[in-house]
Amino acid sequence: MRRLQGLLMDLRALTRGFRVTFRTMLRAPVTLRYPEQRPVLPARSRGRHELQLHENGLEKCVGCELCALVCPADAIYVEGAENPKDAPISIGERYAKTYTINFLRCIFCGLCVEACPTEALQMRGDFELAGVDRESLIYTKDRLLARTVRREAGDSWLP
Ligand code: SF4
Ligand code: SF4
């Protein structure tokens, strides 16, 4: 009698286990064949930063250094300078002569984006931040601007 009870309990456990297995088999996979398949990220996901440009090509960043001041990880370095009158770089009186973000330090909190008065700094859905050495993860201004330019040029590989 006891053996029969044990057998029934085993069968019940087995059925429960198979039910979970078959139910999961019929569901769509939650994983992607990355990098061939790319995830659709939420619109407000916090990926790598980008420095935005105005439609006329001038930089939105006016080199005010607020982003660097609020950064809790000390990841941003900005050096502002007077805008050249004959060939302005931004719309303000000043522009960012030097602008770097150290992604080895950044914790992607988004405080710098909130602090920016001109909406020059935006976080995009770019999460591919691998590098071959430490220096390659310290992004200079040309790299922070470059992807904006590439997106405007219709680079479909960019997220
Ligand atoms: S997201 Fe946060 S940690 Fe990263 S640069 Fe901006 S303020 Fe600093
Ligand atoms: S990104 Fe924004 S907050 Fe940072 S220096 Fe430029 S204008 Fe100022």
Image (cartoon, rainbow, N blue to C red):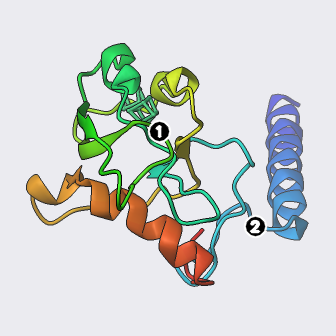
Whether residue 119 is visible to the viewer of this picture, yes or no, is yes
Q: Which residue is mark 2?
A: 29
> Compared to 81, does 47 lie above or below?
below
Residue 92 horizontal side relative to residue 56, left or right: left
* Viewer-nearest of discs 1 and 2: 1
Q: Is residue 24 above or below residue 153?
A: above
Q: Nearer the viewer, residue 1 or 100?
A: 100
Circle 1 is placed at which residue position? 92
Q: Secondary structure at mark 2?
A: loop
Q: Is residue 135 left or right of residue 108?
A: left
Amino acid carrying label 1: it is Gly
- Tell me what residue is drawn at x 35 percent, y 59 percent: 86
> Quadrant of residue 88 in the image?
bottom left
Say whether residue 103 is visible: no
Disc 1 residue lies near ligand 2 with CB under 8 A: yes
Q: Residue at x 56, y 81 (%)?
A: 157
Crowding at mark 1 (Cα within 10 Å: few <14, some 14-19, many 20+): some
Depth check: give the residue in front, 53 or 105: 53
Q: CA distance from mark 1 to mark 2?
A: 50 Å
Percent position of residue 154, x then y: 63, 84
Q: Secondary structure at mark 1?
A: loop
